[in-house]
Image (tube, rainbow, N blue to C red):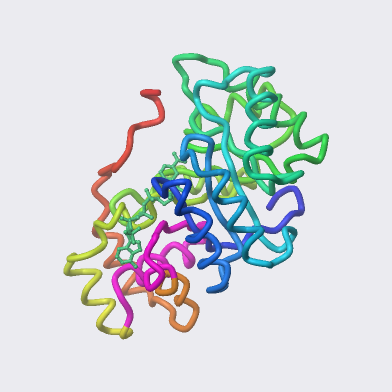
Amino acid sequence: MNDGHEIPQLGLGVYKVPDDEAAEVVRTAIELGYRHVDTAKLYLNEIGVGRGVRDSGVPREDVFVTTKVWNDDHGYDETLRAFDDSLERLGFDYVDLYLIHWPVPSKDRYVDTWKALERIKADGRARSIGVSNFTERHLDRLREEAEVVPVLNQVELHPWLPQTELRDYDTANGILTEAWSPLARGRVLGNDVLDRIAAKYGKTPAQVVIRWHLELGNVVIPKSVTPSRIAENADVFDFALDQDDMAQIATLDSGERTGMHPDNG
Ligand SMILES: NC(=O)c1ccc[n+]([C@@H]2O[C@H](COP(=O)([O-])OP(=O)(O)OC[C@H]3O[C@@H](n4cnc5c(N)ncnc54)[C@H](OP(=O)(O)O)[C@@H]3O)[C@@H](O)[C@H]2O)c1
């Protein structure tokens, strides 16, 4: 990342994983080799995530954990308080990455919120800071009014919404792009193009799409609570897509979102 820290390119998403299941899911993923977990205040499972990291027995510094400030907590002081609360729920003395979850342009407080993240980074309590669901316009504003460049921008991204222009912008500005809903929330199943490519490599459509993300250079955080799928989603390092596969996947681009457009928040 642009601040010198490293992030594992593949991680586990835990949106909609109940808090009382999160510890087990996170521990299972770590046992299967994951070293990166993506949570948020909104997901109401930071307590379980922290417990899962501790239960795994893997040292804290070997697992990369992201959490996020929620829309209700925008503002400098509010964000500092929200961060303290997240850290306490996780049971950690630092997080690896703290993100602004959405820019919420209707509130227009994301620059103050970002300044709080800069403070938290300066204090060493978040090793890295970044944003989520920021468009070029929101990122331009941070460039003009703030000091620190976000390490990454976590956005909805999958074959139906490849975010080509935003990825180019991020790259030009030293910002990694991280894909949320990388499997389009399960839509990758039952698609002819992906089925054909999967059959060619003896892989599943989900594995083909995760491989597609890796080859584009995206950080990717597929979510699953199913141990066999958690394992499947990480078993993507023994094959590579060719130019023809990438061109075929590019035909799926339809601009369709599973979530809301960031300008509407
Ligand atoms: N920043 C943001 O605004 C934002 C928004 C949304 C999500 N996120 C992050 O991104 C992560 C991933 O996104 P997501 O949870 O929305 O969707 P996703 O990862 O695209 O898809 C998850 C769905 O796919 C299923 N699945 C997972 N692996 C599979 C496989 N190998 N084969 C078939 N189905 C499979 C899961 O089922 P099971 O769990 O039942 O196995 C679940 O229903 C989230 O968990 C969260 O950490 C961030």
Coordinates of residue 29 in the picture (x, y in percent): 52, 66
**In the rendered view, would you say 263 is above or below 93?**
above
- Which residue is at a point 26% across and 61% down the rendered structure image? 188
Coordinates of residue 137 in the picture (x, y in percent): 50, 27
**In the rendered view, would you say 126 is above or below 75?**
below
Coordinates of residue 109 in the picture (x, y in percent): 57, 17
Q: Is residue 206 magenta?
A: yes
- Which residue is at a point 31% across and 53% down the rendered structure image? 184
Q: How many marks?
A: 0
Please provide the residue range marked out in magenta: 203-230
Toward which corner of the image does residue 251 lie, by quadrant?
bottom left
**In this image, 222 relative to 198: left or right?**
right
Which quadrant holds the C terminus? top left
Of all residues, the one furthest to the front in this rendering is 20
Toward which corner of the image does residue 56 lie, by quadrant?
bottom right
Toward which corner of the image does residue 243 lie, by quadrant?
bottom left
Coordinates of residue 252 in the picture (x, y in percent): 24, 57
| Quadrant of the picture in which ligand 1 is shown | bottom left
- Which residue is at a point 21% across and 77% down the rendered structure image? 196
